[in-house]
Image (spheres, rainbow, N blue to C red):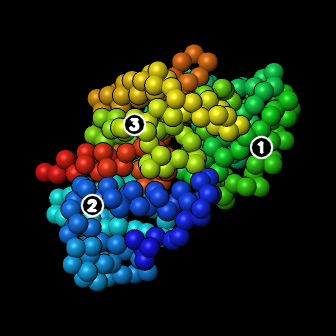
Amino acid sequence: MAAHVDPAFATPGAGDYEDFFEDATRLDAAIAAAGLENVWLHRRGEAKNLATGEVKKPGAGWQPWGVQSSNSLNMAVITPGFHPLQVELDVDRYPHWNVFQQNAGRRLHLAGVGLEGAGFEMVDAIRDLVADGGKIVVKTVQSKKGIWFNEISGPDDAQRFVDDAIMDIAFHMLGAPRAFLVQQHVTMEYEYRLFVVDGQVVTGAGAIEEHTPIDATCRPFNNAVRKNRALHSPIEDRPDIVDELVYFGQHIADEIKAGPGVNLTRYVLDVAIGENGPLIVEFNSMLNSGLYASDPTAVARKVNSLRS
């Protein structure tokens, strides 16, 4: 394992510590689901079979099983018919979905910058959401490309925010309608990550950065949660909160599977408790999501059950 995964820092909460154990548990999950002979460790252009030790360069059809951006470990599961944890590009379109907009628990708009009358301008979206002042959150619809938090004192302050934000906006986003998700800032407590496969919520864990699957005290849904993620509040054991969020998440997953226009079978759903009950925080790809104290083996086995 040490030959393929970078060393871990000794302190939980340090980034490499979590990366090490997340990579290790992903590897364990892949082996449990596909078998040792079907898992190859890929690093620096070569892949080594765990069962035979054979080394070769990966070719077409090899499927990744790990975090997309990880430089320490990438796994390729090449069993014919094995369903990979592939990137499902539709997940980046979640701000457009009715199921998200109706369950976000906050007012929001899709807007753009520099549209010249061809769409809803970000400045107008901000003014509508916080006419009397307040906090906003602006995210790019394209995943992981930018997020801004700001306190807006009033309508005139909205233009100041947009002018500042333009400095960080990629050139290709200027003039693109509906490129930004402009949202009211609302209270979100007990944020929880759910892993969904083929319409079933398979496992989940609280959004606790220092936790990895080895910290799970119960599975498939770990009961450890943190009320205020930003303030790093104390960790609580709250099966009642977890049950409520899992039930809500399954309702969302059912709606996505039954409804038209959303083509997803493997994705991550982040949920939380808002002022009026559970809400959707966001959706993510499985290959771009941390595990926290979830059960990646349960996900791997469920994915493998989709084999034709």
Residue in the image at 53% along x and 47% along y: 211
Query: Tag count in the figure?
Result: 3
Report the side of 5 relative to 14 (left or right): left
Task: Give the number of the disc on residue 31.
Answer: 2
Q: How far apart are the alpha carbons under marks 2 and 3?
A: 21 Å
Q: How packed is label 2: few (under 14 Cα within 10 Å), some, or many (20 or more)?
A: many
Please tell me which residue lies in front, 190 or 277. Answer: 190
Please tell me which residue lies in front, 131 or 7. Answer: 7
Please tell me which residue lies in front, 177 or 62. Answer: 62
What kind of residue is marked 3? Cys
Decide: is 44 above or below 287: below
What kind of residue is marked 1? Val
Task: Give the number of the disc on residue 218.
Answer: 3
| Quadrant of residue 23 within the rendered picture | bottom left
Report the side of 190 relative to 21 (left or right): right
Disc on the earlier residue, 2 or 3 = 2
Where does the image place residue 266, in percent across and percent down from the top left? 34, 45
Helix, strand or loop for disc 1: helix
Disc on the earlier residue, 2 or 1 = 2
Disc on the earlier residue, 3 or 1 = 1
